[in-house]
Every structure is written in C-alpha cells, then in structure tokens.
Image: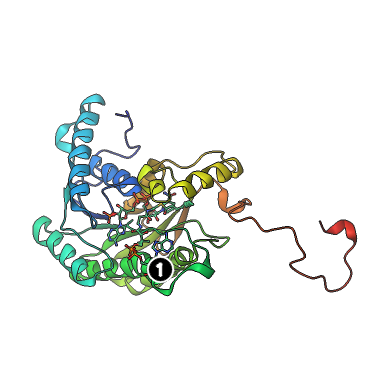
Amino acid sequence: MSSWQSVFHPTLFTNKVALVTGGGSGIGRAISKELASLGATVVIASRDREKCLQAAREINDEITLCCSRHGRKLEDRGRVVVGPSTSIRDEEEVQNLIHHTIEKYKSLNLLVNNAGGQFVCAAEELSSKGFQAVVQTNLTGTFHVCRAAYEQYMRDHGGNIVNITLGNRNGMPNMIHSGAARAGIENMTITLSQEWMESGVRINCVRPGIVWTDSGFENYGPAGDLFVEKILPSLPAKRFASPEEISSAVCWLLSEGSSYVTGSVVSVDGGSAFHFLPLIDIEDTNHLPVYGVLPRKAKL
Ligand SMILES: CCCCCCC/C=C/C(=O)SCCNC(=O)CCNC(=O)[C@H](O)C(C)(C)COP(=O)(O)OP(=O)(O)OC[C@H]1O[C@@H](n2cnc3c(N)ncnc32)[C@H](O)[C@@H]1OP(=O)(O)O
Ligand SMILES: NC(=O)C1=CN([C@@H]2O[C@H](COP(=O)(O)OP(=O)(O)OC[C@H]3O[C@@H](n4cnc5c(N)ncnc54)[C@H](OP(=O)(O)O)[C@@H]3O)[C@@H](O)[C@H]2O)C=CC1
C-alpha cells in the first residue's frame, strides 16, 4: 500500500457530500479516496455495484491506515459509500441515484462526472450504434447527471461540479466518438457555468492527458500495449500521469481556493497538448497535391 497522502488540508471537505460516477476504479477511485481522506462523504456509483463495494471497503481501510501512519486525527476521516447500480446512459437510473444520495446523506455539494470511456475503431468502420454508445455514455450521461443534481439539489443550495474529459486538442484518430463527446462536454460546461451561476453552482472540466490506470488500459487489449509503446517516448514528460495527479486538480476545483473559476478547462497532461503526438501513421504519398510552386527540397 502506498504512503500517499493529499497535499490539501485534512478537513477541506468536512461535512460535504460528494458523488463520483465511476468511482470504483482508476481515476474515479483516486478522486474518491482523496475527497474522503479530506473529510467528505463520497458516494460512488457505476454499472458494476460489486466492484464499487469492494473499492469502497479498500479505500476506507486505506484512509484509516493513512491517518494512523501520518499522525492525523481519525475523526477527520470521511468515508466512501456506494449508491445503487447506475448506468449514466439511463436517465431514470440517474434520477434515482441522485434521489438516493440526497435522501440518505441529506445533501449533494460536490459532483465529479468521471464515468466514461470508449473503444478503438476507425471512423469508416464505426457503426452508428457504436458512435451513439460512446456519445450517450460520455456526453449524454454527463448531461443526465449534471441536470439531475441541479434539479434535485444544486438549484436551491448551490454546488460544485467537475467533468472529466480527455486531451483531444488535435482530434482523436480512431476514437472519433469520444473526441466529439468530450469536446461536447467542454462546451456544455461553459453553457452551464453561465446558466447556473445565479444558483451558486460552479462547473469546470479537468482534461487529463494519458493516465496510467490498469482498469482503463485493460479495456484496449493488445491495442493498448501498442499505443503505450508508441506514445510513451513521444510525450514531453516521457511518462504518463498518475491518477493522483488528476485527483489533485479536481480537489482544487472543488475547493474554495478556485472560487473565481467556472466554465474552465484545466489540462493535466504534462504539456502534451502542445507537442506533436503520433496518434496515427499517415503514409508517405502525394496526399495534398501542390498548388503553386514548391521546391523539391520542401517535400519528402
Ligand atoms: C489504444 C489505446 C488508447 C488509449 C487512449 C488513452 C486515453 C483514454 C483513456 C481512457 O479513456 S481509459 C478508460 C477506458 N474505460 C472504458 O472505456 C470503460 C467504459 N467503456 C465501455 O463501457 C464501452 O466501451 C462503451 C464505450 C461504453 C460501449 O459499451 P456498450 O456496452 O454500450 O457497447 P455495446 O452495446 O457492446 O456496443 C454498442 C455498439 O458499439 C460497437 N462496439 C463496441 N465495442 C466495439 C469495438 N471495440 N470496436 C468496434 N465497435 C464496437 C458494437 O459493435 C455495437 O454496435 P453494433 O455492432 O451493434 O452496430
Ligand atoms: N486513463 C486515461 O488515460 C484517461 C481516462 N480518461 C477518462 O477518465 C475517466 C476514468 O477513466 P479510467 O479511470 O482510466 O478508466 P476506468 O475504465 O477505470 O473508468 C471508467 C469508469 O466509468 C464507469 N462507467 C463506464 N460506463 C458507465 C456507464 N454507462 N454508467 C456508469 N458508469 C460507467 C466504469 O464502471 P462500470 O464499468 O462499473 O460501469 C468505470 O468505473 C473516463 O471517463 C476516461 O475516459 C480521460 C483521459 C485519459
């Protein structure tokens, strides 16, 4: 077990109730752990409730151990609890999750829309159903959770929302569905920051570069291994991000320390958005015929 502890004050989120979708694995698990270690009651939910239950047990044990190891007061600890099994694609299930959270824990102050994902597929081979599946999960699912949280609690009490997106500044070859959905989430975030400001709701995005999570990369099989081999050496930092590096940015956005920040995107990508990444091989042929005059030495 690692000796990691948050850089933030141990009571930063005392008396706050947070919901983290997809909190049972990877980045969502790290966010849930950090929020609970800073005093929050954190509800996690996804489709696989068993996975969430196991993660909650492990995280709660890890937090207790961390408190003892670092001489922190045990009473400052928050905890991770598990909501009903929910697919964020299903509006009714989402409404039910939010209702359950407010009924049982009496408020919903912080929301992290982390659940999401995609598969690798070239645009020309992607079925309409496949495109819809990813857009509905990432974009529509995030909308469902934001709206239900707003309607049922945040409209009257204020709140703070962070949406996790994905670094796609240069498009997303072989993941057109996800690139489109994440760009949609970022624009939706700007809109909601304006519509919901008068309710005291702040909403921002954290846009990770590539983050090492076993759960995430298992999803891609051998394609993931090939991707790692190719991309890792071209990253400016020569490494991926840790889930804790994403969580830390999320905690800052959920804290009062970012009180003047809304409608923003915080990139946590080791500078990779500003660096050429060979996401796709383009063969060396005459793709863009020259108009005008170009010396021979100016082309391959
Ligand atoms: C190569 C590595 C790239 C690294 C990128 C690094 C950056 C990003 C990292 C991450 O985001 S890590 C997170 C990874 N975690 C996940 O993606 C988990 C969540 N994912 C899912 O639940 C699913 O993949 C999904 C995207 C939501 C789809 O699930 P769903 O169960 O709804 O789909 P199905 O009903 O099975 O299928 C619907 C439709 O989609 C087509 N389809 C599904 N998989 C593929 C595939 N691998 N290739 C092509 N098409 C696929 C499927 O065929 C169905 O359409 P029809 O065939 O019926 O028309
Ligand atoms: N790892 C990376 O490099 C990056 C990841 N991201 C994004 O960060 C988020 C977390 O990814 P990561 O931790 O790596 O991978 P994981 O696969 O561990 O996380 C995805 C989570 O989303 C949940 N989920 C997926 N579909 C649904 C659904 N329909 N309803 C409810 N929950 C759902 C999954 O739980 P369950 O299967 O139980 O439903 C799972 O817990 C994702 O949105 C991902 O795309 C962004 C940039 C980079």
Residue drawn 59% across and 40% down?
A: 233
Q: Can the viewer see residue 146?
A: yes
Q: Is residue 187 left or right of residue 73?
A: right
Query: Which part of the image, by quadrant, shows the N terminus?
Result: top left
- Nearer-the-camera pick, 256 or 106: 106
Query: Which part of the image, by quadrant, shows the C terminus?
Result: bottom right
User: Quarter-wise, where is residue 119 in the image?
Assistant: bottom left
Residue holding disc 1: 130
Dot 1 falls on a residue whose secondary structure is: helix
Instruction: From the top left corner, tell me how far across and down residue 209 is, in percent.
Output: 49, 50
Residue drawn 19% across and 32% down?
A: 64
- Nearer-the-camera pick, 81 or 7: 81
Residue drawn 27% across and 50% down?
A: 23
56 above or below 5?
A: below
Q: Amino acid at mark 1?
A: Gly
Residue drawn 49% across and 42% down?
A: 240
Q: Respond yes or no on whether mark 1 lies under 8 Å from ligand 1.
A: yes
Instruction: From the top left corner, tell me how far across and down residue 177 is, in percent.
Output: 45, 67
Q: What is the tally of numbered marks visible in this picture?
A: 1
Q: Is residue 278 left or right of residue 211?
A: right
Instruction: From the top left corner, tell me how far across and down residue 242 is, in percent.
Output: 42, 40
Decide: few, some or many residues near mark 1? Use Cα within 10 Å; few <14, some 14-19, many ≥20. Answer: some
User: Quarter-wise, where is residue 8 in the image?
Assistant: top left
Q: Quadrant of ligand 2?
A: bottom left
User: Quarter-wise, where is residue 134 in the image?
Assistant: bottom left
- Nearer-the-camera pick, 209 or 133: 133
